[in-house]
Image (cartoon, rainbow, N blue to C red):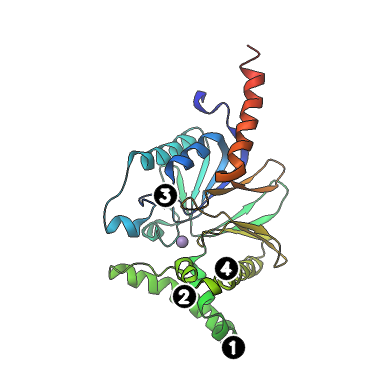
Amino acid sequence: MAQEVNAVRVRTLFLSDLHLGTKGCQAGTLLEFLKAYDADTIYLVGDIVDGWRLKSGWYWPQSHNDVVQKLMRKVRKGARLVYIPGNHDEFLRDYIGVNLGGIELADHALHETADGKRYLVIHGDQFDLVVRHARWLALLGDGAYTAALFINTHLNIVRRRLGLTYWSLSSWAKLRVKNAVNYISRFEELLAAEARRQDADGVICGHIHHAAMHEQFEISYVNTGDWVESCTAVVEHYDGSLQLIRWAEAGQEQAAAETIAIETVSERAA
Ligand SMILES: [Mn+2]
């Protein structure tokens, strides 16, 4: 306990797209964040360990181990940890429904906030093909949409078996800069629609490395972002309110300020 006495405690913590096992992962910064925040429940919303990259060359420095250790330490201290695999850690999808040493593996989850709102928690790669071919699928109707979701998942399993790299919607969209905004907004719209289909009040996802929190589609759309570029996370406070933390920018200073305030009371007074 001693190590995290100064941590900000939240009801729930949502993290995605850490990409541990790649040089891009900002593990040191992430570790600082994990020291600053403690939660009753932690959702890992996919692409936590990058299995695709690990296969083509092992990259696992001590800092990546430290992140895993820090998360496991939180579990030992009583945190509930739900791991929802994404496309880069798809190998874990074979273990969905299993509890691995205190880690619950799930395809998706329905999270209820303290104020009774229900959120669909899902990585989001399931919608790549639909996003890419939205116009055609809209013309073909609902059956085509369901088929695309099915094909999307199975096409990538086949690619994986063949040792091909995952086709990435986000990097593909980024290459087409002019259209990137369109793809992002289409992704957001689809995820919002899926939440509505599942009778939820909102969705919390990752995958496209684009943190966001808005109600543009008459439902809460929340994207946790990533720890490769933006260093973002989403927390649920004890009143049920959600907050997007941009750790690389203001979050760090804010948490530091709160930490100093706690120190002032508990330590400096002594
Ligand atoms: Mn992904």
Q: Earlier in the sequence, mark 4 or mark 3?
A: 3
Q: Earlier in the sequence, mark 3 or mark 1?
A: 3
Q: Position of residue 37 (x, y in %)?
A: 56, 37
User: Gap in Å between the C-alphas at discs 3 and 2?
Assistant: 30 Å
Residue at 51% x, 23% y: name it. Answer: 2
Q: Are marks 4 and 3 in contact (CB under 8 Å)?
A: no
Q: Amino acid at mark 3?
A: Cys
Q: Which residue is mark 2?
A: 150
Q: Which residue is mark 1?
A: 139
Q: Secondary structure at mark 4?
A: helix
Q: Is mark 4 within 8 Å of ligand 1?
A: no
Q: Earlier in the sequence, mark 3 or mark 2?
A: 3
Q: Secondary structure at mark 3?
A: loop
Q: Which residue is mark 4?
A: 184
Q: Is mark 3 within 8 Å of ligand 1?
A: no
Q: Amino acid at mark 2?
A: Phe
Q: Amino acid at mark 4?
A: Ile
| Image quadrant occupied by the C terminus | top right
Residue at 44% x, 56% y: name it. Answer: 47
Front-most of 84 and 249? Answer: 249
Q: Quadrant of residue 192?
A: bottom right
User: For the residues carrying marks 4 and 1, which lies nearer the camera in this image?
Assistant: 4
Is residue 182 visible from the viewing direction of this image?
A: yes
Q: Which residue is mark 3?
A: 25
